[in-house]
Amino acid sequence: MFDRPTSKELIEAVYLFLEERIKKELPKHLAFNVQISINILKIVMRELDKGESLTEETKQILINILGDSKKATIKNLAKEISQGKIDLNNKKLKEVLIEITKKKLSVDNPNYSTYKKLLK
């Protein structure tokens, strides 16, 4: 429905401006805060780029372990675990938690060393 520039392109323009033009002109304490803002904008860009597919993939993973598409939420998974309905030693649970964590990290911080190790 919307024309160009897209939301992603607008966000990218702002973060590039902050990163390439503004950050280096600021005192270190302000540059640090600008870097935090840049990181947030990059997260939002990755959410826009991957959010729908990751949400659908995660829902399928949750359906597989919870067995019900209506219950397929992370909150319900946590509830099942806390109520002892899913054993913490369940191998499938471990795989599910690792897969969901990888999906979250791919958006939150794809350069995180643990994420890179999980991909191997």
Image: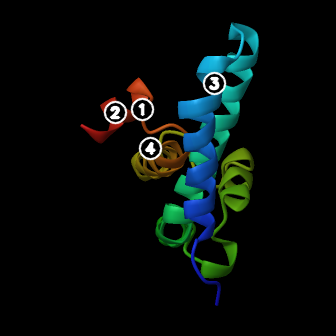
Q: Disc 1 or 4, which lies upstream in sequence?
A: 4
Between disc 1 and disc 4, the foreground one is 1
Q: Nearer the viewer, residue 115 or 81?
A: 115
Q: Which residue is mark 4?
A: 98
Tell whether label 2 touches label 1 (CB within 8 Å): yes
Q: Disc 3 or 2, which lies upstream in sequence?
A: 3
Residue 79: horizontal and vertical position, in percent?
74, 54
Name the secondary structure under disc 2: helix
Residue 70 image-quadrant placement: bottom right
Label ID, residue 116 = 2
Name the residue type under label 4.
Ile
Disc 3 and disc 2: Cα gap in Å? 28 Å
Label ID, residue 111 = 1
- Image quarter hosting the C terminus: top left
Residue 100: horizontal and vertical position, in percent?
50, 51
Q: How is the image coloured?
A: rainbow
Q: Which residue is mark 3?
A: 23
Between disc 1 and disc 2, the foreground one is 1
Q: Disc 1 or 3, which lies upstream in sequence?
A: 3
